[in-house]
Amino acid sequence: MPPARARSKWSATRWIAAILAIAVHVTFVLFLIFSVNWQNRRPEPVTMEVYAPPAVEKIEPQKQPEPPKPEPEPPKPPVEAKPPPVEPPKPDIALKEKQERLKKEQAERARREKFEAEKREADRREAERREAEKKQQEKRLAEARERQAREADALKAQAQRERQALEKAAADAARTKADADYIRRIQAKVRGNVVVPPDMPGNPEAIFDVVQLPTGEIIDVQLRKSSGVRAYDEAVQRAILKSSPLPRPDSPDMFRRNLTLKFRPLD
C-alpha cells in the first residue's frame, strides 16, 4: 500500500542519516584524541656542548615535567541529521512566460521610446516649419508694406505733379487771359485813334512790332506784315504812336517790352 511504502522509505532514510552522523562523531573524537596525544608527546633530551675552562664540566639541561594528559571528552549523542528541504523545480512554463513578459515589456518600452523620439522630432520639425512660415510671412508683410509705401509715394508724387500741372495750366490760362485782356486794351486804345481810309477793300490784317517802356511810352513801331493797303498801314502806325503811353498790365510781372499787335479795319 502506498502509506506503508512511504513509511519504510522514510525509516531507511533516517537510519542512513543516523549511521552517517555516528560515523562523523566517531571520526571527530578520534581526531581530537590524536591531536591531544601529538601535543603531549614527551620531548627528547637535548645535548649541548659548552666550551668553558677545563675546570668546568658539561651541564645537561634539566628535564621538564610532563604535563598531565587531558581526559577525553565523552562522546556526544548522535544528532539526527535533517535532510535539506527540497525545493520543487520551477516549471519551464513560468520561466517562458516571464521571459515573454520581459520581452514584451522591453518591446513596449522600445516602442514608447521610439514614439516619443518621433514625436519630439515631429514637434521640432513643426516648430521649424512654423518659424519659417512666420519669417516668410513677416518678409511678405514687410515687402507688401514697402510696396504700398512706394505706391503711396508714387501716387503722392503723381498727385503733386498733376496738381502742379493743373496749377500751372490754370496759371498759364489766367496769364494768357490776362495777357489777352492786356493786348485787347492796347488794341482798343489804338483803334480809337485809327482813321480808316475810305473805300477800304475787305478786312485785311496788319501786324506791327512795338517796343515800349515800363511806363507804357512807345519807343519804336515797325510793320511786320502789311495789310496790302498802304494807307491803312500808315493810319494804324500813326494811331499806335498817338496812343503812347499804352495801358499798363494789372500785374507788373505781366509787362512785356516787345509787343506784337494785330489790327483789322472791321474788328
Image (cartoon, rainbow, N blue to C red):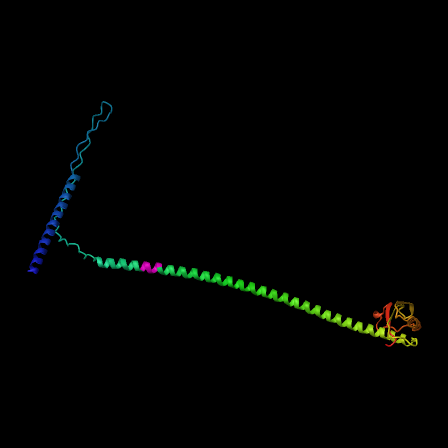
Magenta-tinted stretch? 105-110
Give residue 11's position: percent from left, percent from top: 8, 55
- Could you tell me if residue 68 is visible in this image? no
Q: Residue at x 30, y 58 (%)?
A: 103
Q: Is residue 76 magenta?
A: no
Placement of 58 over or under 64, stated as above or below:
above
Give the residue furthest to the top.
Answer: 54
Q: Residue at x 7, y 58 (%)?
A: 5
Whether residue 7 sits left or right of residue 152 in the image: it is left
Whether residue 38 sits left or right of residue 140 in the image: it is left
Q: Residue at x 51, y 63 (%)?
A: 133
Give residue 163's position: percent from left, percent from top: 71, 70
Give residue 237's position: percent from left, percent from top: 92, 71
Majority SS type along the magenta span: helix
Q: Residue at x 41, y 62 (%)?
A: 119
Q: Quadrant of residue 215?
A: bottom right
Give residue 256's position: percent from left, percent from top: 85, 68
- Could you tell me if residue 108 is visible in this image? yes
Placement of 30 over or under 267, stated as above or below:
above
Please name whichever residue, 106 or 142, is drawn nearer the observer in this view of the structure: 142
